[in-house]
Image (tube, grey):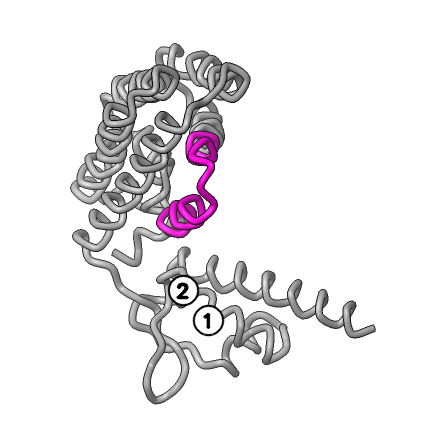
Amino acid sequence: MAERESDRSVSQTVRAQLNLRDLILSGDLRPGERISELQAVETTGASRTPVRMALVRLEEEGLLEAIPSGGFMVKTFSERDVMDSIELRGTLEGLAARFAAERGASSRDLEPLKRCLDEIDGVVRQDPISVDAFSSYVALNARLHAMLTELSRSPPLIRQVDRASALPFASPSGFVMTQSTLPDARDTLMIAQDQHRVVIDAIENREGARAEAIMREHARVAARNLRLVLQNKTHFDLLPGLALI
């Protein structure tokens, strides 16, 4: 009985967390807006304990900030905050790539990544690239980055990469859909895909410093896209969370 109650509480916490996150990223809960525990209970329909845990988790993700007088406030991010988050993610992914290269990856380890590369090639070869193809790229790119990180064989590092990627505008695929509106969209994807291929080659050849440098540079593609998106605000609706910047 106690175990079932615990599972139900965890499930409520996850639902409340996802519900509140969606409200934040959509702009329904505005930057600087205060969220009380009672308000969150009414909004999500969950009980107080799961809601309290959900609010704490969103604070850990960086979307909320605890207020000394009680409750939480939706955080506002500067462009520099986001750039720093992207740089941090790139630094951690670079370290993961170096670990993967130095610790050795077998042909069997690399085969799923190479298959994923081939699938991405099928997407980026389209000219022009459709919106549906960009959506496919988002999923494939996320899978490739996850597999690259797992090759580090470092659970602590994998956790930190996941944490750094938690904000939508800092994730590896954070700006792909907004990028689809830009005139050089296909060229940018081709560059990113070439970097994917080169880093896998570096890992296969156990070139740790090269693998690390490529992944750090690769993250800066997202930083470039952020600057372009902020200059052209007509496409903000394609990226949840931009209302927070």
- Say which residue label 2 marks: 60
- The amino acid marked with disc number 1 is Val
Please state the extent of the stretch shown in magenta in the rendering.
145-165
For label 2, count other residues whose C-alpha is less than 10 Å away and answer few (under 14), some (14-19) or many (20+).
few
- Say which residue label 1 marks: 56
Residue 212 visible? The answer is: yes
215 with respect to 125 (left or right): left
Looking at the image, which is closer to me, 159 or 241? 159
Q: Is residue 25 magenta?
A: no
SS category of the residue bearing label 1? helix
Q: CA distance from mark 2 to mark 1?
A: 6 Å
- The amino acid marked with disc number 2 is Glu
Q: Quadrant of residue 192?
A: top left
Residue 189 visible? The answer is: no
223 with respect to 116 (left or right): left
Identify the residue shown where x is 64% and y is 65%. Answer: 10
Coordinates of residue 242 in the picture (x, y in percent): 30, 51
> From the image, which quarter does the N terminus lie in?
bottom right
Coordinates of residue 193 in the picture (x, y in percent): 34, 19
4 with respect to 194 (left or right): right
Identify the residue shown where x is 26% and y is 64%. Answer: 76
